[in-house]
Image (cartoon, helix red, strand yellow):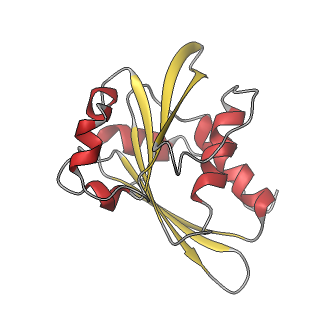
Amino acid sequence: MQHYKTSLVDEAATQALGKSLAHCLQVGIVINLHGDLGAGKTALTRAILHAAGHQGTVKSPTYTLAEPYEILVQGQVTKLMHFDLYRMRSPDEFIEAGFRDEMNEQTICIIEWPEKADGILPLPDLEIHFAIIDVGREVELRALSEKGKVCLSQLHFAPNL
């Protein structure tokens, strides 16, 4: 599967999608999240982190630009970096902050507002687009690499459960 589209009627559906995604994460995967403010990007990331074993709070890195976490992926402790580039003024800030070093085969990266670092970021393995609709959100997942394809092929999501 290279493409998956669904509707999320409420927060519980967003949490269920995050839980499903947590179970198909691979070490080194890069996931870009697109959507307007309030579309559900941070809520999805929070659900992924909690489903992958993070016990504490998950704050939006809107002001810090990045927050590191340790999670379990396929039984091994793995670093996940949650980036929120909304407040970045130029793509150079990403490089100056040393964030490019986090883009490696050992770290999972989830990036909100990746368009703020166009030309700096590597191509993602998975893109997730959120659209606010009358009731809830419409979400489209697109695999852009072999890692992304494997992730989507392992995704078992039932939005109404």
Q: Residue 161, image x and y in percent?
A: 82, 56
Q: Residue 120, image x and y in percent?
A: 20, 47
Q: Residue 105, image x and y in percent?
A: 32, 23
Taking the spot 63% from the left edge, 83% from the top edge, the residue there is 133
Left or right of residue 45: residue 11? right
Q: Nearer the viewer, residue 23 or 38?
A: 38
Count of number-bearing discs: 0
| Quarter of the image where one finds residue 69 | top right
Q: Is residue 70 above or below residue 30?
A: above
Q: Is residue 143 above or below residue 77?
A: below
Taking the spot 69% from the left edge, 27% from the top edge, the residue there is 54
Q: Is residue 90 above or below residue 151?
A: below
The extreme top residue here reads: 76
Q: Nearer the viewer, residue 36 or 5?
A: 36
Left or right of residue 155: residue 123? left
Taking the spot 53% from the left edge, 51% from the top edge, the residue there is 62
The extreme left residue here reads: 119
| Quarter of the image where one finds residue 77 | top right
Q: Residue 13, image x and y in percent?
A: 75, 59
| Quarter of the image where one finds residue 94 | top left
